[in-house]
Image (cartoon, helix red, strand yellow):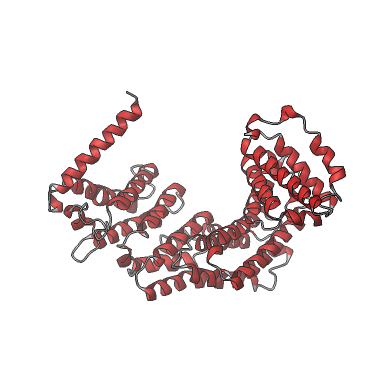
Amino acid sequence: MSLGIVLYCHDCVLHVAIATTLHGVAAADDSLVVNLVMLILSHVLEFETSRLAQNPMSNCVSPFVSEGLIKTITRLCATYLAPNALLDSRKVSPAILQDFGCQSGDRASELLNFLFQQAMVYLLHWPTQPVVMENLIEFLLVLSNTGAINPVLSSQMWQSLVQANASAESFIAASAGKNEPTLNAAVARIPSSLRGQLTEALCRAGMASVDLNMRTAHFQAMSEPVEQRLQQLIALPTFESKQTVNDVRLQEELKMLIEMYSGIARSAEPNSHTAITAFCLPALPVIVKIFQIFQGDSQIANLILNFFCLMVEAQLCYFPPRDALQVYTASDNLIRAYCRNNLGKKSLLDDAEEENYVGLLALLTLLSHLVQVIPLMTEQLLAYPSLSKQYFTLVSYMVEVYGEKLVSLSSELFQMLLHSLLVGFRHVSVDVVRNSFQALGELATYHWKAMQDQKPGLDATLPTASRDIYGVPAPYLPYGAFR
């Protein structure tokens, strides 16, 4: 018997044993399982956080232990906290409901407030421990999925966290200041990428409230300061000057604000998309302008591309036509700005190719116009598996759906398209090869139909381009491409 089967059988037996133990008692104090969970959630966590609060630099406290402890508590909360007794009342143990239920008389709200207070101890004293902060943010995301989150949202400590996240400075500005143990200073020391994730967690939690007024007030408290900070930046008289573009503090402030915008865009759900759309849409032209000014900074450029990707992915299905047009217009301006800056661009930096890969991968996710991406692709960039797969999937789809648009392509662009298909034919990935042949098949089908209707089809470009296609030797074609 394999080890995997043994472990699976052990888990099944343990699950049955836990279920039997839970259903065998009516009071939480008599349940061994509940007592064990409470021991971890309360006593162990409180012991660790009390030692951390006394001396964060002590050798007796370990970030590694805290990482595992927060992850364990997150999983316990996801499993036990606030079970939905209304949907499955026969299977939920009375002992579980007594300590972890969110109905009247249950103690989940009290436990959740305690857990949140202990989490704030980590935030106050270890904001620069990246994995601890990542696990802490994941904990907040899990809390947003529980029905017991409402008492926490109305607490003063939660409101202080929302205000601190919206108003705290960037990481580099906080590092230059005084190291004061305040919530605002602690949030400021969190790296920009994690500030975006924290913003997402706070936004999701606030939108989980059952009170409409609370949802509205929470979102305004979180988003309005971020919008005001962005407006203040672009209103600087010297914002477009070379001196400002090279200002490291301003760059870090921009990165943080874009990360926070991305976090808000990423948190969009059916009950929150209206507020998030009203917040994000006015910022799109502003962020495109920032991209044009700071396009020499690859980090800011990639963050902006990622924001647009998230905005389109999370929100586009909810947009009415007027809002969708704004997104399309801003996306088109962004893509054109990227193409103008990168077409023919060469760099001697060691990581230049990786920067091109990251930018084009984000651009392909956003792209809505094939003509704008073909000149940017190179054979070296197509060597990246994820990028090449995304590109050839896009090419196959665009050729299939918009074959008639290929007539308007210049001979040079059409040659570039066919050359990229040649690279796809020789690719090691079966999916890439299949998409390349599918695109070629769609080209041939379109041309044949045009000839049947006595139309020119691809005659303007086909005579010179076809020799390249016919010159593909059979040994270069993987067997999987013909399946």
Between 43 and 336, the residue placed more toward the observer is 336
Left/right placement of residue 153 relative to residue 264 reads left
Q: Residue furthest bottom?
A: 213
Q: Residue at x 38, y 76 (%)?
A: 213
Q: Residue at x 38, y 65 (%)?
A: 208
- Using the image, determine if residue 165 lies above or below residue 35: below
Q: Quadrant of residue 15?
A: top left
Left/right placement of residue 49 relative to residue 342 reads left
Between 119 and 196, the residue placed more toward the observer is 196
- Using the image, determine if residue 439 lies above or below residue 109: above
Q: Position of residue 304 (x, y in %)?
A: 62, 59
Q: Position of residue 23 (x, y in %)?
A: 16, 48
Between 47 and 483, the residue placed more toward the observer is 483
Quarter of the figure with the C terminus: top right
Q: Position of residue 320 (x, y in %)?
A: 56, 71
Between 131 and 18, the residue placed more toward the observer is 18
Residue 350 visible in rendering: no
